[in-house]
Amino acid sequence: MTTRMFASPLFLGFDHLEQMLERASKASSDGYPPYNIEQMSQTGLRITLAVAGFTMDDLQITQEDNQLVIRGRQTDDSQGRVFLHRGIAARQFQRAFVLAEGIEVRGAWLDNGLLHVDLARPQPETRVKTIQIRKPGNGSSAVVDGRPER
């Protein structure tokens, strides 16, 4: 039996957050390829993956809903080559990052075996809204389950 993090009735509409946390916990625990996440500015983030041996054609970056997915697939170019030692693995990988609502992917580039992906986190707006309280019987009616209640 799993414990629900947002089971309290005070957390309304947070089911999607619980699903995101669940998805992140199921992400691959494989440490390949290693990566860094840097805060570049107050609103800017950068993910850097060490992808030595991969070319731009071997890499694919997609944004699938609120997930940033980076895939790498190398072709086997060892035909006719004799390795006395092979320490650089030619293996595929998939690394997924769960993005918060509103985070935008600004761009990506490959430089000296490092794949950089820049992200922008928008500044949240402070919102204050006053809700009018009405007296019953003024022609206004409460709405229950999408139907007016009289």
Image: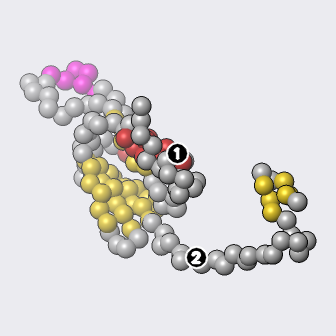
Based on the displayed image, in which of its 4 quarters is residue 29 positioned? Answer: top left
In the rendered image, residue 82, in percent from the top left (x then y), is placed at: 15, 22
In the rendered image, residue 84, in percent from the top left (x then y), is placed at: 8, 24
Quarter of the image with the C terminus in it: bottom right
Q: Amino acid at mark 2?
A: Arg
Based on the displayed image, in which of its 4 quarters is residue 72 positioned? Answer: top left
Find the magenta span and give its range: 77-82
Which residue is at a point 38% across and 37% down the rendered structure image?
Answer: 26
Q: Nearer the viewer, residue 11 or 73?
A: 11
Q: What secondary structure is the stretch in magenta mostly built from?
A: loop
Q: For mark 1, give the secondary structure.
A: strand
Q: Which mark is residue 64?
A: 1
Q: Nearer the viewer, residue 125 or 64?
A: 125
Q: Which mark is residue 127?
A: 2
2 drawn magenta:
no
Q: Amino acid at mark 1?
A: Glu
Label 2 environment density (alpha carbons within 10 Å; few <14, some 14–19, many ≥20): few
Can residue 71 be seen here?
A: no
> Is residue 16 positioned above or below 71 on the image?
below
Label 1 environment density (alpha carbons within 10 Å; few <14, some 14–19, many ≥20): few
Cα gap from disc 1 to disc 2, whole angstroms: 29 Å
Of the image marks 1 and 2, the number of the one nearer the N terminus: 1
Quarter of the image with the N terminus in it: top left
> Is residue 69 positioned above or below 78 on the image?
below
Count of numbered circles in the view: 2
Which residue is at a point 22% across and 20% down the rendered structure image?
Answer: 80
| Viewer-nearest of discs 1 and 2 | 2
Which residue is at a point 86% across and 58% down the rendered structure image?
Answer: 148
